[in-house]
Image: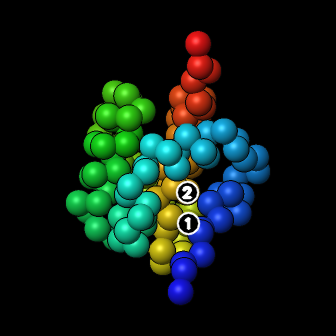
């Protein structure tokens, strides 16, 4: 029995008015193997270690943000609060919304081949 592929676009559209398909594809590509496992494809918003991992690995490392931890933590909380009521928060959706919040969606667009 095969598992159905998540509809990331539909999930993201619940939280934002416009969807950047190229950026979505880039976020999915960035997450790669993490999306294969049920646990790793979700963000546990109630786990402080997970929230720190999102801040440090995604916001600081991938998006290269240098704001204070308190500012970045507040941004993560804002996004996860926006998704309140959803127990299984998609990592793709959380990361996409964070990239959108910080104006970094374009960095997920595929680079043209030269």
Q: Is residue 111 above or below residue 10?
A: above
Work out whether residue 113 or residue 16 is closer to the camera in this orientation and state it.
Answer: 113
Q: Is residue 21 above or below residue 106?
A: below
Work out whether residue 4 or residue 89 is closer to the camera in this orientation and state it.
Answer: 4
| Disc 2 target residue | 93
80 relative to 106 in the view: left or right: left
Location of residue 69 in the rendering, given as x and y in whole percent from the top left corner: 29, 40
Location of residue 79 in the rendering, given as x and y in whole percent from the top left corner: 51, 55
**Residue ID at (57%, 24%):** 111
| Disc 1 target residue | 83
Secondary structure found at label 2:
helix
Q: Residue furthest front?
A: 1
41 relative to 22 in the view: left or right: left
Q: Residue furthest left?
A: 49
Q: Is residue 46 above or below residue 91?
A: below
Name the N-terminal-most of marks 1 and 2.
1
Q: Is residue 93 above or below residue 25?
A: below
Location of residue 90 in the rendering, given as x and y in whole percent from the top left corner: 50, 64
**Residue ID at (28%, 42%):** 56
Evaluate if marks 1 and 2 touch, with contact meaning CB atoms under 8 Å apart: yes
**Residue ID at (59%, 30%):** 110
The CA distance from mark 1 to mark 2 is 9 Å
Label 1 environment density (alpha carbons within 10 Å; few <14, some 14–19, many ≥20): some
């Amino acid at each position: 029995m095969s598992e159905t592929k998540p509809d990331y676009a539909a999930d993201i559209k619940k939280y934002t008015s416009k969807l950047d398909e190229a950026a979505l594809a880039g976020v999915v590509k960035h997450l790669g193997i993490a999306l294969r496992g049920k646990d790793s494809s979700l963000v546990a918003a109630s786990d402080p270690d997970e929230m720190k991992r999102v801040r440090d690995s995604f916001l600081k490392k991938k998006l290269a943000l240098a704001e204070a931890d308190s500012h970045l933590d507040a941004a993560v909380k804002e996004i996860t609060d926006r998704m309140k009521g959803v127990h299984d928060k998609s990592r793709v959706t959380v990361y996409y919304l964070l990239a959108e919040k910080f104006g970094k969606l374009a960095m997920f667009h595929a680079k043209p081949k030269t």
